Image (cartoon, rainbow, N blue to C red):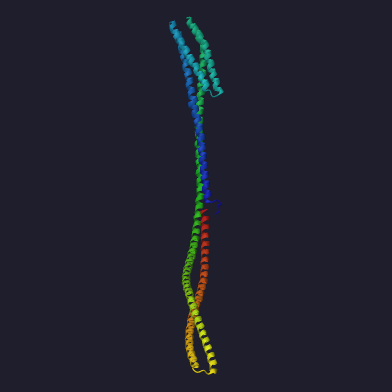
Amino acid sequence: MSDPMSIGRRILVLVIASLSLLLVLLVSSLILTYRINAQVTTLTGNVIPSLEIINGVAVKFASIRATTLRYMLAKDDADRVEQARKLVFFRQGLDRDLNHYESEFVVDQQEKALLQQVRQAVEAFDSHQFDILAVSASSQDVRSALAEAQAPLGQVSNALRRHHDYSLQLAESAVDASRFNLRVGVVAMVLLTLVAAVSLLAFGYRIRFAVQALTEGFRKKLVDLGEHGTQVAAAAADLLLASRKLSEVADCQRVQVEQLDAAADDIELGIPAMRDLLAEAQEQVAHTAHSLSHVKNLLESLVQHAGQAQPGLPDELFGEAATLLSNLDRDVQRSGAAMAAVEGVVEAQCRSMALLVQQVGKVARLAVENTSLAASASASAMSLSVTARGMNDEVGRRAA
């Protein structure tokens, strides 16, 4: 193939790219969620409670104005004391809300400056309020004091309104930031999704192309493997034929060995018999020699007594000689029979030895044939091993 990357590496790159894009999506989602959570926390934990406290300050300041008016309209001292107590209560609540706001919800210097303006306006109104209460307590005309208190009253209202508007601006900024982060996150997710889709399609197309090329290569390799399989089958058939021939040769060798064992047994059994016959023939020959010695002595006696001419003695000697000759004839016959028996045994042993030599020659020829068949079987096995190793290597390369 033209591309050096294997299909396994392509799939690995595809998986890594997918996991990387998923990781980027996860990180961007977490960042977007963190930012939106921060903006929502700002809204719910700072802006909305600060608006609530500012509205509470405005309500308490309105209550102070209404209580001041009731104090001015009081008919007796008891009513004035009650209204004065309410004024102290509302004023303490106002200070408490301002202190709580300053300690918990001030986020920047501008908000702190606006809160300071509210405090200063409230303090300016307090100084004029004390004058109004003193004039009202002495039953004097309070119109001039009320007129002088209008300016601090307007300052308090303006300061509260500015602070309220700034809190609303912070809320709008937080909402706008949340919307912007949400839009940016959506756009980023859409872009990442498009990039992931394009990457997956590109890698999928390349993997599809690689799979097609690999399939074609596998098809060719299957044809080659089929040819190798035919060669392996032929080599296996040759090996089977050689093994059958080896089996037949082994059977023949076994028969020849059995025949050799039988011939060896015959030879081994014939040797003691031949030894006995030879001993018997030797005994007969010794007996014949002894008889011949007696005959010789007798003849010498006859020769000696023939010169002396003693009557009756030759006849006796001749009778004894005839007896010795008769015994000698029997011994000679026995020796001949013993020698014939030895000759028969020797002839049988010679035949057994010839058969043994013949069987040894057959075994040698079978051994030569067995060696040739073994060489042929070894060559077939070697060819089969080489073909199988080639198939195994090819399958390993295709698997890689």
Q: How many marks?
A: 0
Q: Residue at x 51, y 71 (%)?
A: 367
Q: Residue at x 52, y 62 (%)?
A: 385
* Between 281 and 312, the one nearer to me in the picture: 312
Q: Is residue 73 visible?
A: no
In x, y percent, where is residue 267? 49, 75
In x, y percent, where is residue 234? 48, 65
| Quadrant housing the N terminus | bottom right
* Between 14 and 393, the one nearer to me in the picture: 393
Q: Is residue 151 above or below residue 261?
A: above
Q: Is residue 94 visible?
A: yes
Q: Is residue 319 above or below residue 6?
A: below
Q: Residue at x 49, y 16 (%)?
A: 94
In x, y percent, where is residue 201? 50, 46
In x, y percent, where is residue 335? 49, 84
* Between 142 and 9, the one nearer to me in the picture: 9
Q: Is residue 361 above or below residue 384?
A: below
